[in-house]
Image (cartoon, rainbow, N blue to C red):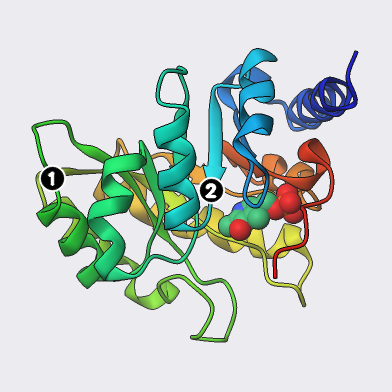
Amino acid sequence: MSELAARLSAIDAQIADAARRSGRDPAELTRIVVTKFHPSSLVRELHALGVSDVGENRQQELSAKQAELAALELRWHFIGQAQTNKAASIRRSADAVHSVDRERLADALHRAAEDETPLDVLAQINLTDDPGRGGVAPGAVEALVEHILALPSLRLRGVMAVAPLDEEPASAFARLRGIADRVIALAPEASWISAGMTGDFAEAIAAGATHLRIGSAITGPRPERG
Ligand SMILES: *Cc1c(COP(=O)(O)O)cnc(C)c1O
């Protein structure tokens, strides 16, 4: 078995353990492998190992890899901060955009629709006190959600967040869970909770995460990028 295959199966076993410990069925979890900074050859290897969902955080890298690997059956998740002027490129390459954190970005993604297929989007929530981090402030979530729900080419699927560095992930994800419940009250089908990375996926699973975004634990360390 390659090192990549060994890491992938080890993490999948840890995900399944964490799910069972939380009384959850591992089959309800989607494991997204975050491949940012890695070459498309690695995405190809992951696909050969059965990976179906991959995540990227930069538009250019997403677009290049998705174009190169378009023949492979893969779902591409955009998880990075998005500039409004890149919305059309993101929409063309991504199957789901996890990082919709403002109305202008939602509008730009909506305007970029080229056909009838709706784009899956998540509202990114800022769990820190720093407005410079990505995400909508918890107090503004309902307004953003209502705005997205009024845009017919976007399909709101749920919420996404990154745990703050200076807080226990369990308490941050508990807050996220409360916000997710508020979103579900407005949009019952928006039940995805995208949370959990290499360092905190077990806590995210315990708090109800449905979509895990795991990079380095599976891919190995990211190559330096100058
Ligand atoms: C890079 C990244 C991840 C994955 O991080 P790891 O710690 O390598 O698992 C998850 N979510 C977002 C938003 C990221 O940018």
Report x, y in % for residue 64.
45, 44
Is 23 located above or below residue 109 in the figure? above
* Residue that mark 1 sits on: 113
Quarter of the image for residue 55 reads: top right
Determine the residue positioned at 74% across, 45% down: 201
Report x, y in % for residue 69.
47, 27
Determine the residue positioned at 44% across, 52% down: 159
The reply to whether residue 25 is in sight is no
Label 1 near ligand 1 (CB < 8 Å): no
Report x, y in % for residue 192.
45, 40
Determine the residue positioned at 36% across, 41% down: 94
Q: CA distance from mark 1 to mark 2?
A: 20 Å
Is 54 located above or below residue 5 in the figure? below
Q: Residues within 10 Å of mark 1 (few under 14, many from 20)?
A: some
Looking at marks 1 and 2 on the same chain, the residue that comes earlier in the sequence is marked by 2
* Residue that mark 2 sits on: 56
Seen from the viewer's position, the closer of residues 10 and 211 is 10
Q: Secondary structure at mark 1?
A: loop
Q: Residues within 10 Å of mark 2 (few under 14, many from 20)?
A: many
The N terminus is located in which quarter? top right
Report x, y in % for residue 129.
57, 85
